[in-house]
Amino acid sequence: MKNFFKIFIATFFLTLSFSPFLANAGEVFLSTKNIEFARGEDFIVEVKLNTQGQQINAVEGELVFSSGLGVKSISDGKSVINFWIQKPQITKLGNVRFSGLTPGGFNGDNNLLFKVTFSGKVPGQNNIYLNNLRVLLNDGLGTQANITTIPITVLITQQINNEILNLFSFDKVVTDNEPPEGFKPMLASDPLIYNGYEFITFTTQDKISGIDHYEVREGDLGIYVVAQSPYPLKNQKLDVPIYVKAVDREGNQRVEVLEPKNPIPVSKPGMGIFAVLGLFLLAIVLYIKKQLQTK
Amino acid sequence: MSTKISITITSLLILLVVSLSIFLNNSFVFAVTESVSLSASVAGCGDDSIGVGESCDGADLGGASCVSQGYASGTLTCSSSCAFNTSSCVSATPVVSNSGGGGVVMLPTAMDVIFTGTTVPLAKIYILKDGQLAATIVALPDGKFTTTIRGVSPGFYNFGVYGEDVKKNRSTLLAFPIYVTNSAPTNIGDIVIKYDEFTVPSKPQTSTGYLIGDLNRDWHVNFLDFSIMKYWYTKYLPPKHIDLNNDKKVDLIDFSIMGYYWTG
């Protein structure tokens, strides 16, 4: 009976391993240059997707990590995702949520979704894995792709990170001196959102460090406020220019201007003002004349 | 003496009023300007629709912009001969490095991406750069097409190409994930969109008479529609035509469906 059980288990796993279903399964994997880091040392974990021949156009999920790790930054520079529904960000302790779309889809074995720079806080084993993952095919139906995920475990050692260790760090700091790409903010209104009020949409990319955030300023005298697209406008008269600033992770900026749809017409002074001006000057002349006569 | 002063002041006054009027109102301009306008038109040019051999036509710029033509910003217009007019485009501003050492001026490097291929004769080819319409061109009578997107910064891009035949049927979006380098122009060649690939009607597909995913009813499925759908993402009771799979919620599946029907 014991032998039968062993044979059954072995057959079951052998069958699974040769199953075409699994052979075609894509894989969301976590890539790091090392698995052992000193306490306080920064390291990058890249979240990547191997599509295994499937055309993928939408991805969402959560990157979960142990409390012994801290997140220093998250970057979507060089990401295969064109439009983020939810930009990768910490939504709760030990959890980075993300959701994005690439129209037309993509294919390939090494597609970067985003990368997270961690810092080892507490010595010991720390798990990093993906949860609630959904990867959808570009088939017009939103069919779930065959995807597996592989967690990783990194070891944070007792040794405290110092300058010497930093010199040997595998993860180079990205140098980005270029502003985000040029873009075109769009003005729109639709009864379906913001009760039909005018809003703007904007998006651009930064191919090196990734976009950090956007800011919007309404009018020359307004102030920039951090904003997300779509952004409902406070000035519904649309009579002032709208400035949209994209800022990348390194602080480089690009500002695009949306000219006012209904600019305030520059009023030309009528003849009335000249009549008043003329009368005023005439009064001065008469006053001077009178003064001269009295002399 | 006093009369003389008064006459001088009065003359100055009149001169001041006239000068002010000219400056502010242009109402004292006596010159009459006559102009004779001459216009010449190229065959097919001027019908506000990009045709064979045209880069643009009237307001139809085929998705091109100053940025796609290698400039930093500005307004791209179309000339009377249906070629791009970049006179109002602004060149890229040199970027000053903040890496120390007295501020090294670094010019952004940008390259051309060249698309060539064959399709059915006179089909309209749409080129998307990271989901945004970057160029449009009409294939020649022999089906060949070629176009260039200028000023692309080095980096990873997801280019998309689809065609629309004369019967207004679209082909599905072909994806070209490419890493653009700054060493040489990138060629995306041998693109083939065959006759039997024009299967997606550009005409109404839904019962309401609009394209699937065209949420704002402008005959395009693009970032504006994405923004409207994003507004309703995870919200309760979305409007019916935003919920593309009719499951009473807007989630990743609806975005995926929109991504398939994307036109840019």
Image (cartoon, coloured by chain):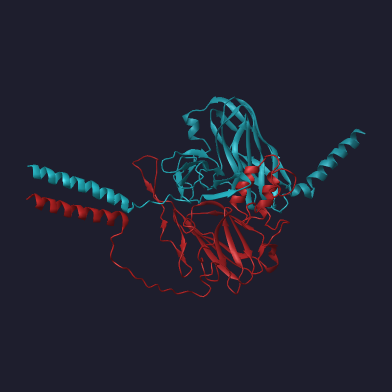
Observer-nearest of B237 and A228? B237
Observer-nearest of A270 and B143? A270
Q: Is residue A125 above or below residue B62?
A: above
Q: Position of residue A122 (x, y in %)?
A: 59, 24
Query: In terms of image quadrants, where is residue A230?
Result: top right
Can the viewer see residue A136 in this picture? yes
Quadrant location, the N terminus of chain A:
top right
Q: Position of residue A254 (x, y in %)?
A: 45, 46
Q: Which chain is red?
A: B
Q: Position of residue B65 (x, y in %)?
A: 49, 58
Observer-nearest of B147 and A171? B147
Say whether residue B240 is left or right of residue B137.
right
Q: Is residue A232 above or below residue B42?
A: above
Query: In terms of image quadrants, where is residue B90?
Result: bottom left
Total numbered badges shown on the rendered structure: 0
Can the viewer see residue B183 in this picture? no
Residue in the picture at 63% in, 68% down? B119
Say whether residue A244 is left or right of residue B161.
left
Considering every residue shown, the one lying at the far right of the view is A1
Quadrant location, the C terminus of chain A:
top left
Q: Which chain is cyan?
A: A
Say whether residue B88 is left or right of residue A28.
left
Residue in the picture at 60% in, 71% down? B122
Q: Position of residue B209 (x, y in %)?
A: 70, 58
